[in-house]
Amino acid sequence: MLKFIIHGIAIAFLTVLTQVGGIVYLIVLALSNRYQLNLLKSSGLFLGTYMVVCLLILPFLAPMFGRVALPVTGNLKPLNYITCLLNRHYVRTELREQLVGVSDRINKQFEGTKTNYLDANFPFYDGFPLFPHLSHNDGRKVDIAFYYTNQETKAYSNSAPSFIGYGIYEGPAANETNYPKQCADKGYWQYGFLNYLIPHWKADKFSVDVKRTGTLIRSLATDQRTSKIFLEPHLKQRWKLGGYNKIRFHGCQAVRHDDHIHLQL
Ligand SMILES: [Zn+2]
């Protein structure tokens, strides 16, 4: 019975995290039982099978569901390669073209600049949510990291204070609209919860590169393919983006957007 519960939890966890990991786990479990494999061999078989599925099979199957993988190298890349190993970098072709185009333009304007994406969507099925982003379920959504400069040298840095790009905030100043506080006061505990989960040891080594980040947002906000961009209202105000009506507030039921940009078609 305990074994049954552990396998159930593992399958649910892997499905939520990677979409296909639970199925791979089930197949490997069946093979392990059939051939009486020990834990070490079963784990090796799982990792090997998962990597083959993730790197070689999914990129070919996803287009049948109208999705393609985002690039792994070049001007557009993941901030953290784990995003791709978890199959969280699939989008519709139109969104891929938009992102590749804008990252090439930014790279031309600011030589050497890489645009780092965060979570996008899973490869299959509209409506299958990418936890914890419930709206990332149709290939039309992607999160993009801010650009940062090194606090000491003031030079552009192709990195971010948070290793996953989320959870280290460019918070509101005393005279700015403070939705994090308003949402917390209304009881939306999840709004800023990543602050408590993400290590802050690199937080004061970086500053947001407002010039590059503002250029990216303006470019996306004037692109016909964009339907909405989510950004925390105090940053919209501070970065003088008031004239762009596609830049919206996402609501207290979501999470803070002063650590990344959310873009959707
Ligand atoms: Zn998002």
Image (tube, helix red, strand yellow):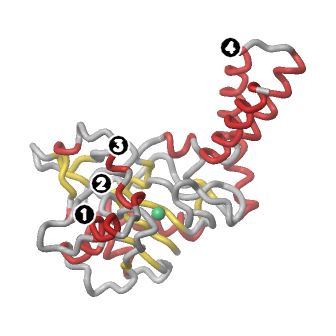
Q: Earlier in the sequence, mark 4 or mark 1?
A: 4
Q: Residues within 10 Å of mark 1 (few under 14, many from 20)?
A: many
Report the amino acid beneath label 4. Leu
Q: Residue at x 49, y 54 (%)?
A: 119
State the quadrant of the N terminus.
top right
Q: Earlier in the sequence, mark 1 or mark 2?
A: 2
Q: Is residue 206 above or below residue 136?
A: above
The label number, if any, that marks residue 198 in the structure image: 3
Disc 1 secondary structure class: helix
Q: Residue at x 45, y 78 (%)?
A: 228
Could you say which quadrant of the image residue 65 lies in? bottom right
Disc 4 secondary structure class: helix
Q: Are marks 2 and 4 in contact (CB under 8 Å)?
A: no
Q: Earlier in the sequence, mark 2 or mark 4?
A: 4
Disc 2 secondary structure class: loop
Disc 3 secondary structure class: loop
Mark 3 or 4: in front is 3
The label number, if any, that marks residue 212 in the structure image: 1
Q: Are marks 1 and 2 in contact (CB under 8 Å)?
A: yes
Could you say which quadrant of the image residue 22 lies in? top right
Image coordinates for residue 183, horizontal then vertical, percent: 34, 68
User: Closer to the camera, 235 or 3?
Assistant: 3
Report the amino acid beneath label 2. Thr
Q: Is residue 3 above or below residue 193?
A: above
Q: Is residue 102 above or below residue 249?
A: above
The label number, if any, that marks residue 40 in the structure image: 4
Label 4, label 1: how many angstroms apart (C-alpha)?
A: 47 Å
Could you say which quadrant of the image residue 223 lies in? bottom left
Q: Is mark 2 within 8 Å of ligand 1?
A: no
Q: Is mark 3 within 8 Å of ligand 1?
A: no
Q: Earlier in the sequence, mark 1 or mark 3?
A: 3
